[in-house]
Amino acid sequence: MKDEQPVTDRPATGRPARRGALWAAVAWTLGVLALLVALPLAARDRLPEQVATHWSGRNPDGSMPLTAAALFPAGIWLLVALGVAAAFRFRPGQARGHFAAVLAATGVLLTGAQTSVVHANLDRARWQDAAPMGIEVVLVIVAAGAAGLLAWFATRTPATGGTGGTENATAHPATALEVPADTRLVWLSHAANAWMQVTAAVLGLGAAGIALIAASGLSGPNWFTAVTLAVGAVVLLLSSSVQVRVTAAGLYVGFGPFGWPARRFAPEDLLSARAEQRTAGQTGGWGYRINNRGTTVMLRGGDCLVVRTRRGSDFAVSVDDAERGAALLNTLITGAATPTR
């Protein structure tokens, strides 16, 4: 058996995914910056003029003026963000997961530390009277590490054989490929909606901001709003991108940055595959849509991979190089329908 070979040999553009990731990073950077500055300034009437910013063991042993306590971590954050931007400028793609992990972990670490500082100094007459630090430090470090790992897994560059551009879009059924019997082929592609990714980032920042304000003691917890924003962020994030793969096992469509949840179609469950032009107006909007045309995962108008199941329904996903994916699927469907002797 020969090694698995990609069906297509043109490099993936990945422009929607990169654009969405870029704007999500910008939203994250600005949101973290706003929280770092706003948290202590919003509590200025309940904080001493000098706030404790360093603890030896559990006791405070260092302080800063309130304004400096707000601006110093913000300055560190800007330096980190600029450093990541400069590094990404010269090494795009290969280390994307590392850059995202640094931004996520550092942002969570700094906002968690700032929240702990505000909470410890809240309603204290002097910075020397600040509350001791204990489990808060451990929780912040653990949360920062978890955020970094999640960001790395969500944005690491997959090892793919490449996908094609949208110039091969077609409005008629794709033909089957001629595949040698001793060759295993795989087709991989992806698509993303930048605005949905940015909106998810904004909603997630809103939920995090509400949680941090509650943790700092500035207000009581508003769980309904925080949970609503968090659920909206997760739903949008999962429906804002897809990873599509066609192998001998059939069609795999993974949702979100982790490729989960996913829908799978075995070749024997399908009647045919085709590439088709569709728009958001035809499918009823963006995201996961169900209407009289069947189920459509609509992330951008244009080329869609459409499969007809044996139940008589259609499943479509907007993705680059759909014609080649459909052609390989038709080959697999024909093979599954041919009885073996």
Image (spheres, rainbow, N blue to C red):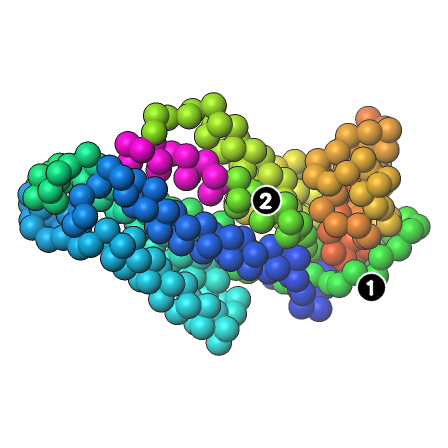
Quadrant location, the C terminus: top right
- At x 73% / y 63%, what residue is drawn? 164
Count of numbered circles on the image: 2
Give how far across and how far down residue 71 sits, in percent: 31, 58
User: Is 117 on the left-hand or right-hand side of 202?
Assistant: left
Return the residue nearer the eye: 278 or 275. Answer: 278
Question: For this rendering, which residue is in front, 24 or 272?
Answer: 24
Q: Which residues are magenta?
A: 204-218
Q: Nearer the viewer, mark 1 or mark 2?
A: 2
Q: Is tag 1's residue or tag 2's residue first in the polypeptide sequence?
A: 1
Please state if 7 lies on the left or on the right of 173 as rendered.
left
Q: Is residue 148 visible?
A: no
Residue holding disc 2: 199
Task: Note whether residue 290 is visible.
Answer: yes
Q: Is residue 115 magenta?
A: no
What secondary structure is the stretch in magenta mostly built from?
helix
**x and y percentages locating residue 132 in the rendered image:** 11, 38
